[in-house]
Amino acid sequence: MASLRVVNRLVCRGFVVLTLLLIFFNEFLVYYTAQSSWHQIDCKLDNCTRLLLIADPQILGTSYDRSSHSPLARYDSDRYLRKTFERAVSFTQPHIIVFLGDLLDEGNIATAQEYKQYVKRFRRIYQNKKFRKRVHVPGDNDIGGENGDYISNSNQRRFENEFMSEDLFDYDHRIRFFKINRMLLDFTNPDRDNNADRLRIGVSHAPLLIGGGPLLRAVISDLDPHIIFSGHWHESRIFIYPSTKVINFYENAVRHFDLKALKEQEHSYLEIMVPTSSYRMGKSKIGMGYAVLENYNLSYTVLWQPNRFILLFTYVFWGLFVLCGAVVYKMMTRCPFRVAKRQTHYSRVSNIPQF
């Protein structure tokens, strides 16, 4: 019996140690493991500008999911966004952080009180006192507009007040950001007389070059952007206009573009679609864009993140494995002793003298 207790103790300790190792890997180490595959882009010139591009974080709300486990889902999603953002900022040391819309999942339907809570959570996730230069554009989940939905003035105002009031327009007298709103068919262009002296970057939630139409013609005519960054589809793609060329960009690599030659020699426009940064969108590939500008040379890569759903499934698998292992172990350790006890009892009875 003493040896059995020792075996039980060792088995239990083994399961506990393995469980702790699994938790440590899934909750902490995996983010550093993902970072090890990222490509660093070294600056060669003094006027280097690093951009961290975040698309569709879609912080979960409280209306769509009212199940008993929804608070846990919101906590886990927020923590994932915060951990991945911390690693990305530490790796890139960005001069500017660009949010490409759908910051909130239920921003367009939230009450005033709910909206304040969502904004508070967003700031808690993406707070960083060192990197304050930011650009925000609204998405359809922030203000409405998906599939022709009505966009209210109040939704626009509260997004502008909470996110866009301190946004960057010009950076270092070299780079200029233009916010393009495909839902409203509108864009910002407050200083068109001096646009020619800047490297012009269009930022939009929905892709522009693939759709065409009057908004695209107006953007090309009035803004003439060197590069456009977008999101919305939760995919990683590169569009070149006016050709119909679409590049699915999912490798761990760095792409290089000469924006001046692309525009002046090839007479083409470039758009880079940034994948979603949230695992809740159901995509197997999750990441953030990382772009480095040196004069008119652009280097771009994606900082791919771990797939959280796979990590959560490992908890389910491990729990079932431990449960099945415990059942089998109990059956193997208890049944032989019961048989042995019965045999001992029978042997005692058989040893009673017969008269």
Image (cartoon, rainbow, N blue to C red):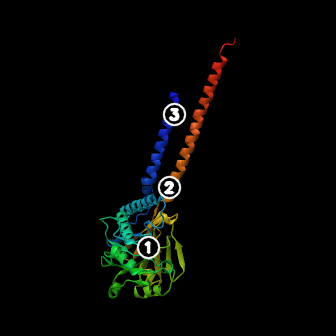
The mark that comes first in sequence, 1 or 3, is 3
Within 10 Å of the Cα at label 3, are there few (<14), some (14-19), or many (20+) other Cα atoms?
few
10 shown above or below 155: above
- At horizontal 33% and vertical 64% (from top left) the residue drawn is 127
Eye-nearest disc, 1 or 3:
1
The mark that comes first in sequence, 2 or 1, is 1
9 shown above or below 207: above
Foreground pick, 67 / 315: 67
Which residue bears the numbered disc 3? 7
* SS under mark 3: helix
Quarter of the rendering containing residue 97: bottom left
Left or right, 338 with reference to 262: right
187 shown above or below 141: below
Amino acid at pointer 1? Ile
Eye-nearest disc, 2 or 1:
1
Which residue bears the numbered disc 1? 109
Q: Residue furthest front?
A: 355
The mark that comes first in sequence, 2 or 3, is 3
Q: Residue furthest right?
A: 355
* Residue 78 x %, y %: 41, 61
Left or right, 22 with reference to 348: left
- Residue 302 seen anywhere in this rendered image of the structure: no
Distance of label 2 from label 1 (alpha carbons): 29 Å
- At horizontal 59% and vertical 29% (from top left) the residue drawn is 337
Distance of label 1 from label 3 (alpha carbons): 58 Å
Distance of label 2 from label 3 (alpha carbons): 30 Å
Q: Residue furthest top?
A: 355
- Residue 317 seen anywhere in this rendered image of the structure: yes
* Residue 112 x %, y %: 37, 72
Which residue bears the numbered disc 2? 312
Foreground pick, 291 / 140: 140
